Image: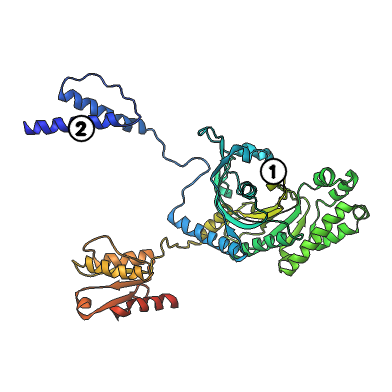
Amino acid sequence: MPQLGLLHGRVWAALLGQLLRPPRVVCIRAVHSHSQVAEAVLTSQLKPHEEKSNLIIKTPKGTRDLSPQQMVVREKILDVIVCCFKRHGAKGLDTPAFELKDMLTEKYGEDSRLIYDLKDQGGELLSLRYDLTVPFARYMAMNKLKKMKRYHVGKVWRRESPTVVQGRYREFCQCDFDIAGHFDPMIPDAECLKIICEILSGLQLGDFLIKISWKDVRHEMVAQKGLAPEVADRIGDYVQCHGGVSLVEQLFQDPRLSQSKQALEGLRDLKLLYEYLTLFGIAEKISFDLSLARGLDYYTGVIYEAVLLQSPAEAEEEPLNVGSVAAGGRYDELVGMFNPKGHKVPCVGLSIGVERIFSIVEQRMKTFGEKIRTTETQVFVATPQKNFLQERLKLIAELWDAGIKAELLYKNNPKLLTQLHYCENMGIPLVVIIGEEELKEGVLKLRSVASREEVAIKRENLVAEIQKRLFES
């Protein structure tokens, strides 16, 4: 009878648990015995498993997981980029992953169809951010800021056809740097180009070229600057031209262009920009390309994009066509679109193509079989004997408190060989070994994993000795 009572209690507890579960609707028929109750509970528990049998476990189209190995590569790339942004005096900024839909509409031209709209949430129509530039302009206008130099690293979303091979996704990371404010012509623009050069050189991707042009040359010259159509057509003759300052000089010599005030102003800006780029020592990386055009509506002046000229690895590696790896330009009217009075704050900025760069670096590492450490552990705490867990825990706490990255196995009595193999597989450089003999003598053994050499160190000197070895390595 006690066993029957226990069964009775378990069955009704299980049934009660099912009844309290939200919000699954289950039709329960009347039951008249313990066996019928048990059958009803068992059936309701099995149904979810039956429904999941056809479930395909995968990530959504255009997205991906990043493994620990991939995260190491990604973090190294981001570290190079962010360090450069900070070196140039930028402040960090973050904005919500989604914005009010009205904040994003009519900012991207035809690309607005690629914006992810969210369902109505409490009366607000929301959309996932398409880039980091429009949220930055909204932030400037909302806080009534007149100038700012900022960087922003974050994810954005676009409903375009993904091409994973070329590093194109629907969810991807952007790294932006922008300078907002009224400044003398072309100085901020030149610094943005200098930053692109520093980052691409620091990432060692191979030779690259930055193409510079105007946004929609003919339309801007005719519709916005009042240039005569025939003069704009004359500029069109140069659209296929590429080159450095010599191209600008050639444009200066054209009589039709030299008679146009608007054309001369644009040419003076380009010549001034090239002078600054020469002073920055990057003129050879720049090519004026009047055919260059970027699709976003908010660009108003000079635009640029960086492309790789060759595969970053050896000849046996297949070239990876990823398009531009960095781009940007001037957008002087975007902040004014968010200001009720239309007050403008001139801006210029750049965006680094992290996903495309990651694809290049990842392919190169696969080609040459480079091994990646997924942790930064510097020291492993080991023991050759049983019942030494407490000593290991006290020892590793000392290392952690000293700022040393350390690990141990989560077992009471691990085998020494198992611990040493773990260190070799994970690339941990040093092992601290504690046992009965070491405990009696007040010393510890410090082992080099690479050379397998061991030395006895007084416990009070252990931290200093580890820090010395890590510094030397």
Give how far across and how far down residue 380 sits, in percent. Answer: 33, 68
Q: Is residue 111 above or below residue 269?
A: above
Q: Is residue 364 above or below residue 28?
A: below
Q: How many marks?
A: 2
Q: Is residue 210 left or right of residue 448?
A: right
Q: Identity of the amino acid at label 1?
A: Met
- Answer with the quarter of the image where residue 170 lies: top right
Residue sitting at 84 percent across and 44 percent down?
A: 222
> Which of pointers 2 and 1 lies earlier in the amino acid sequence?
2
Is the N terminus in the top left, top right, bottom left or bottom right quadrant? top left
Question: Which numbered mark, 2 or 1, is in the foreground of this view?
Answer: 1
Give how far across and how far down residue 129 sits, in percent. Answer: 58, 43
Residue 337: image tag: 1
Q: Is residue 152 left or right of residue 386?
A: right
Q: Is residue 314 visible?
A: no
Q: Which residue is farthest left?
A: 1
Give how far across and how far down residue 167 sits, in percent. Answer: 57, 50
In the picture of the structure, the residue carrying the numbered disc 2 is 13
Asked if disc 2 and disc 1 are in contact, CB closer than 8 Å, the reply is no
